[in-house]
Amino acid sequence: ARLKRQIRKLHPESRSQKKRPITVTVLQAMLETCDTRMIDHRDRALLLCGFASGGRRRSELANLRCEDLERIPNGYLLHIRKSKTDQQGLGRTVPLLDQAAKALVTWLNEAGITEGAAFRSVNRGGNAGKSLSAYAINDIVKKRLALAGYDPKQFSALMGETSLFQAS
């Protein structure tokens, strides 16, 4: 730790830059890159679920299962089974409403997903495949940022960051 501090003092340019959170404006631009293909339905649902549910970690989205979705008027309750911030392993329940819930319903219906992983890969034929990993979600977010005209390197979507999405 001491050596790292000394190196940082000698080479301040090597300090990591703080990444920007994905705001509503950035999210809107990312959503505009989504069309009507299966992969677009998945990405729209993934982005909106991450943002509208209060800022989910990539691992929480990757581990979300259909069995964790409880239908309520205007949306769902998402039962997050485990999280890095849930040290006791008690889980957490967060609402997913309106536009985000509609996007999730569209994705699940179009993909024919009724059980298991909620977010899955999409093959070239437009069929849902295996569950997404947290790293795959990172790649999706970075791709949508680039398509929206943003530099993906400026935004946070790394493991260990406080949240992939932050409302503002």
Image: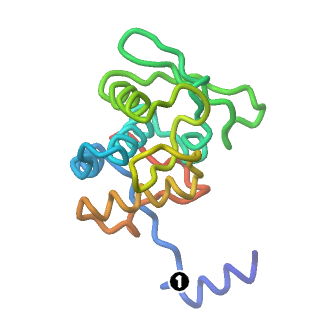
Left or right: residue 146 versus residue 117 is left
- Identity of the residue drawn at 39% across and 48% down: 126
Q: Position of residue 34 (x, y in %)?
A: 26, 48
Nearest the eye: 107 or 8: 107
| Viewport quadrant of the N terminus | bottom right
Q: Answer with the quarter of the image where residue 61 lies.
A: top right
Please, is residue 49 above or below residue 92 in the view?
A: below
Q: Please, which residue is most extreme toward the right here?
A: 88
Q: Position of residue 45 (x, y in %)?
A: 38, 37
Q: How is the image coloured?
A: rainbow
Mark 1 — residue?
14
In the rendered structure, which amino acid carries the disc numbered 1?
A: Ser
Classed neighbour count for the residue bearing mark 1: other residues with Cα under 10 Å, few (<14), some (14–19), many (≥20): few
Q: Position of residue 112 (x, y in %)?
A: 46, 30
Left or right: residue 151 versus residue 161 is left
Q: Secondary structure at mark 1?
A: helix
Q: Please, which residue is most extreme toward the top here?
A: 73
- Identity of the residue drawn at 78% across and 31% down: 88
- Identity of the residue drawn at 39% across and 33% down: 52
Q: Please, which residue is most extreme toward the bottom here?
A: 10
- Identity of the residue drawn at 67% across and 85% down: 6
Please, is residue 11 above or below residue 72 in the view?
A: below
| Viewport quadrant of the C terminus | top left
Nearest the eye: 2 or 35: 35
Q: Position of residue 138 (x, y in %)?
A: 49, 57
